[in-house]
Amino acid sequence: MQNAGLAALGLNWRYLAFEVEPADLRAALEGAKAMGFVGLNLTVPHKLAALEMMDVLDESARAWGAVNTVRLEGREAQGAWRPLGECGERPREVRAQGFNTDAEAMARAVREDLGLALAGASILLLGAGGAGRTAALKLASEKAAELFLVNRTRGKAEAVAGEIQERYPEVKVGIGYPPGPVDLVLNATSLGMQAGEPSPLDEQQFSLGRAAAVYDLVYRPAETELLRSARAAGCRAANGLGMLLYQGVKALELWTGREAPVAVMRQALERNVSGG
């Protein structure tokens, strides 16, 4: 997806994957600065740890409490900071600015893929870990009317509920499965990524017949057990491919300062995932 976008923009850049152990994250970030990287994406389990390793945090990272996109910036002679991709000569001072492009990408994908307005919606959220917490806070900021949080460890769900009640007191928050119907079930757990894994939803406690739509952040496989059950129950359903696309689109725009070629990136992403 990113390499297709870079090629369409005519940039002689390359997007590569590196496996970094948590203990080596700080060293990897410093290495990226030293080698002149223009930016990075971070995946689990680095998104939370990176918060304390950034030189500066964008409002998106502060609001959602996680970093998934890093832009490296150089200080010009006049003192202003500019993205390294826009700097001519290599600057002597380089800093890392952390962004979160996940939250807005999730909201945009849900609106587009399911035709669902988040404002005023009743939502059952499965998972209260890193991805679940970010999703819950974003949904609350979008003025969802009611959130029901389900997590294997109840304490995590309670902690997220407390944070929502403090920051968005107008949003009703419940722990556990809802007693009535909901507009959306959103899976923010990793269940479904491996073949044969069960659905993260306990249908003995909540029937999918009571949900209008289901969104699964998992995008590979393209159809998880949860999505199969959702479609069988007549729900509108979508996987996390749209979220993956839009978080990458925003990251590319942060690095390049140019509008991303969304159609090209979508085509490359769909081809890769369906081929995988």
Image (spheres, grey):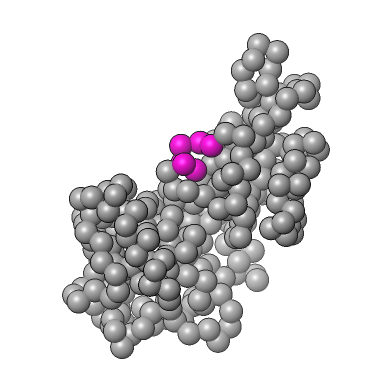
Nearer the observer, 66 or 263: 66
- Picture quadrant of residue 156: bottom left
* Percent of width and height locating residue 103: 44, 51
Nearer the observer, 98 or 49: 49
Residue at (25% x, 61% y) in the render: 173
Q: Is residue 159 left or right of residue 121?
A: right
Q: Is residue 223 left or right of residue 169?
A: right
Residue at (44% x, 81% y) in the render: 199
Whether residue 252 is visible: no
Whether residue 104 is visible: yes
Magenta stretch: dominant SS? helix
* Percent of width and height locating residue 222: 52, 72
Q: Which residues are magenta?
A: 57-62
Above or below: residue 48 compared with residue 85: below
Above or below: residue 26 compared with residue 82: below
Q: Is residue 149 left or right of residue 96?
A: left
